[in-house]
């Protein structure tokens, strides 16, 4: 297939190599400054999220919460040696510091029990323990 030839009107063919290299350096410098600004703002946002969570608040439209452990692991730790109902387990996980923005967290906990039968044992209707 034949290549389309470029005309001299695109501007690049008229620039010297030195001018092109200078433009690349300028853009790289700008890019670096923008990346540093992005990182600084991201860190500030993370700090604000921590402060809001510490006050018991939820991030409006905040997307997904970030936790050090998965919900499965948090539930297994809470249920270790205990049998709890779904609501009690959900409350215990939240009390342990697990963060969620879900308005129906109890349902999420129930689904987690059902999906992870190898980690959780159903003792009675709505009552689970760590397997």
Image: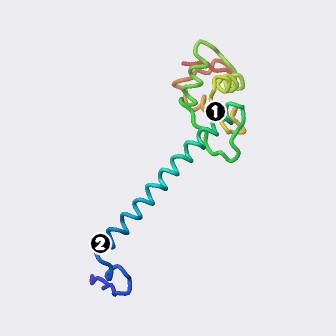
Going by the picture, which residue comes out furthest to the top? Answer: 81
Q: Is residue 2 left or right of residue 26?
A: left
Q: Quadrant of residue 12?
A: bottom left
Q: How many marks?
A: 2
Characterize the local packing of mark 1: few (<14), some (14-19) or many (20 or more) Cα atoms within 10 angstroms: many
Viewer-proximal residue, 29 or 68? 29
Classify the position of the N terminus by image quarter. bottom left
Residue 11 badge: none
Helix or strand or loop: what does disc 2 sit on?
helix
Callout 2 crowding tier (Cα within 10 Å): few <14, some 14–19, many ≥20: few
- Image coordinates of residue 47 in percent, x first then y, are 60, 38
Q: Which residue is mark 2?
A: 18
- Which residue is nearer to you in this view: 44 or 19? 19
User: Which of disc 1 and disc 2 is earlier in sequence?
Assistant: 2
- Using the image, determine if residue 39 lies above or below residue 82: below
Here the colouring is: rainbow
- Asked if residue 61 lies left or right of residue 69, the reply is right
Residue in the image at 43% along x and 55% along y = 32
Which of 8/118 is in front? 8
Q: CA distance from mark 2 to mark 1?
A: 54 Å
**Residue 44 against residue 77 in the figure, above or below:** below
- Find disc 1 in the rendering and name its residue: 99
């Amino acid at each position: 297939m034949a290549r389309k030839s470029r005309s001299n009107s695109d501007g690049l063919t008229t620039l010297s190599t030195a001018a092109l290299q200078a433009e690349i350096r300028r853009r790289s410098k700008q890019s670096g400054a923008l990346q540093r600004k992005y990182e600084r703002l991201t860190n500030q946002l993370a700090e604000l999220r921590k402060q809001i969570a510490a006050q018991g608040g939820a991030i409006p439209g905040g997307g997904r919460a970030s936790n050090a452990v998965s919900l499965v692991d948090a539930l297994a730790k809470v249920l270790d040696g205990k049998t709890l109902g779904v609501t009690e387990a959900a409350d215990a996980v939240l009390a342990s510091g697990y963060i969620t923005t879900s308005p129906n967290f109890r349902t999420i906990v129930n689904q987690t029990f059902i999906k992870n039968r190898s980690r959780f044992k159903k003792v009675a209707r709505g009552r689970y323990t760590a397997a």
